[in-house]
Image (cartoon, rainbow, N blue to C red):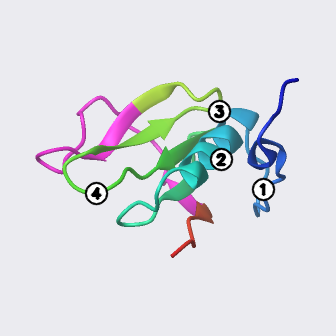
Amino acid sequence: MLTVPLSSCEKLELEVNVPNCIEQQIREIKQEDVRNPPAKVWQWKVDNKIYYYITSDCCDQFNYLYDSNCNVVCAPDGGITGAGDGRCPDFNGQVEQTLIWEDDRN
């Protein structure tokens, strides 16, 4: 008999619609120990595209920016220097950032 954890079927209460792959990343974070600082997921809208920025846990790790198919675009910040991986596109417009999920577990 195959059992599926209930958390994988749990409907996330998000303010905006996100791709299934981003919901899955949030579910995976919720199954980890609480990060320090707690994880956050932001939606970035810029140049008529939508991206998702997910914070990493603790120090010297990249914070990654994903496209709507969960492909890594770049790391805008984080890492040893704090300046990311240097691979982010030059955005033409202003980036509209919206917090869509924050881990509120203690």
At 80% from the left edge and 35% from the top edge, which residue is drawn?
Answer: 4
Residue toward you, 3 or 11: 3
- Report helix, strand or loop for mark 2: helix
Q: Alpha-carbon distance for marks 2 and 4? A: 19 Å
> How many residues crowd mark 2 within 10 Å: few (<14), some (14–19), many (20+)?
some
Residue 41 percent location from the top left of the image? 55, 55
Quarter-of-image position of residue 89 = top left
Residue 68 tag number: 3
For this view, does 54 lie left or right of residue 88?
Answer: right
Labels 2 and 1 touching (C-beta < 8 A):
yes
Which is more foreground, mark 3 or mark 1? Answer: 1
Residue labelled with disc 2: 27
Amino acid bearing label 1: Leu
Q: Which residues are magenta?
A: 74-99
Q: Is residue 98 above or below residue 28?
A: below
| Marked residue nearer the N-terminal end (3 or 2) | 2
Residue toward you, 73 or 6: 6
Residue 16 percent location from the top left of the image? 77, 57
Residue labelled with disc 4: 58
| Marked residue nearer the N-terminal end (4 or 1) | 1
